[in-house]
Amino acid sequence: MEENWEVRHNCGVVVAHTLEDTYEMLRGLQHRGREAAGIAAISDNNITVVKWAGRMRDFDITDLYRILADSAHTFLGHVRYATSGRKEKILQDAHPHVIGGKILDRKTHIIIENPEVVGIHNGQVDESFFSDLEQKVFATDCDTERLLYYYREKGARDLLRRIPGAYTLAIADRRQRGVMVMRDRTGIKPGIIWKKDGKYGIASEDCALEGRNASFVEDLMPGVLYFLGPHGSPTKEQIHMQGMQGVERACFFEWGYIAHHGSSLNGTHVTRLRQALGEALAVEFNPKEYDYVTFLPRCPEAAAERYAERTGIPFLPVFYKMRNERAFQGSTKGDRADSINGNLYLIPEVLNKLRGKRVILVDDSIIRGNNVGKAKRLLYEEAGVAEAVLLSYTPPIGIVGQDGIERGCMFGVDMPPTDTFIARNRTFDDISAKVGMRVVYLSVEGMLRAFEKVGLPRTSLCTYCIGGEYPFK
């Protein structure tokens, strides 16, 4: 297992049959990435790709219609947050990735005309699985490009058989009419099939369907190769993997943080899971001497509300954000700091309520401690609280496991094992001192019981970043 990773991406993917559906569904997945976006238009004789830095709204759909082929029957779309330290290569590394084609570099965006193969991908794949590729020189540092070359050399079935994860992947090949879709056999990253006007597409989450008059069909099955033609139902083929059947390891962090609160993943609603985590917090930490329960916007809101219900402590929203963006997704330390310092504020009307009070602050996780530091300053210096205690419904991330290996994520979340995790080699008292207020974590057992309560067995989850086993046997 490689330990010195740099994360590639954690993203949102869409396959649809109109440009408008693709564009709007990607806007619905903007919470999964805001650094870059791109769309590939697939017609019978041509493929055209456009990708740009920034959000979906940064490229007007009217002008995308002018660039992308009028005869296109299928579109592949992607939103991405970038690798740490790769801000200068956002356009180069943005999706869709291609093999071949004529590249027109417009500085703010790139157009690629008629590539041989095009692909979009959510996840991250260990470079060691590409060691036997004939292709040795690549245009980018991204694993998606390597997956495309692996597909071209060995085929889609061999890719699913031999590469365990983590990926939800769509590939269009100029030699065939339609799109191949596959979700790795462990199912770490999410994906769904939807239907509209008799045609089928895919998306990372079902929240992308809101307002599109499309209906959810099913979650993508791990280890299955789908073929989506321009018309009719998709065909699918279960790819048999010796000794790997039934070994699913979905990312628990998807429910706790990454996914939209309105989504369902693998049949489990995200909000219901976050409520269960709030209930678990109330079982493990149920003090009576606090005045209010609040949360760091926006993921932990449902957990905080349920925690308040179970403890009987009044619930009070305290913070607001100007922009619905996640500091976690900034491509550099400076980007993350700017997103926090310029986007988190106290609601004015609560200031008089908070002065001299004791407050419980619920958060989804503590990675580097950046958000917590800003919240602490606002509560103590601006609001004048007497005490604040921070509750995290995710156990310590990035610890050193019992096997002596430094944890993190190498499977598509921006938490490489080399990151500066606040919990690494620190006791709870050390973390509290570092943050500047008392920190209480939900236990691993408490978290797993919450997942089991909503129907997700602990054996079906990847918990590597919090000390669990490596997900690929």
Image (cartoon, helix red, strand yellow):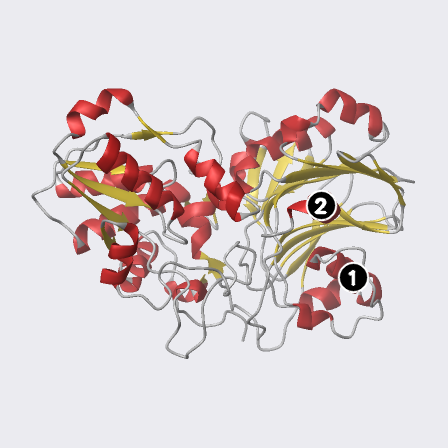
Decide if residue 319 is on the left or right side of residue 146. left
Q: Viewed as shown, does residue 154 lie left or right of 396?
A: right
* Three-letter amino acid code at the position of disc 2: His
| Camera-side residue of 115 and 187 | 115
* Picture disc at residue 95: 2
Q: Residue at x 55, y 47 (%)?
A: 332
From this viewpoint, is residue 271 visible?
Answer: yes
- Foreground mark, 1 or 2, reads 2
Secondary structure at numbered mark 1: helix
Q: Is residue 335 above or below residue 153?
A: above
Question: Which residue is labeled 1 in the image?
Answer: 151
**Number of residue marks:** 2
Give left or right: position of 299 versus 418. Answer: left
Of residue 114 and residue 161, the one placed in the foreground of this image is 114
Residue 304 picture location, percent across and down: 26, 40
Q: Mark 2 or mark 1, which is nearer the start of the sequence?
A: 2
Q: Nearer the viewer, residue 308 or 452?
A: 308
Image quarter where the C terminus lies is bottom right
Can you say whether 317 is above or below 146 in the image? above
Q: Position of residue 398 (x, y in %)?
A: 42, 63
The quarter in which the N terminus is drawn is bottom right
Task: Pick out the residue farthest to the left.
Answer: 289
Please provide percent x and percent y for residue 106: 82, 34
Q: Nearer the viewer, residue 15 or 340?
A: 340
Three-letter code, disc 1: Tyr
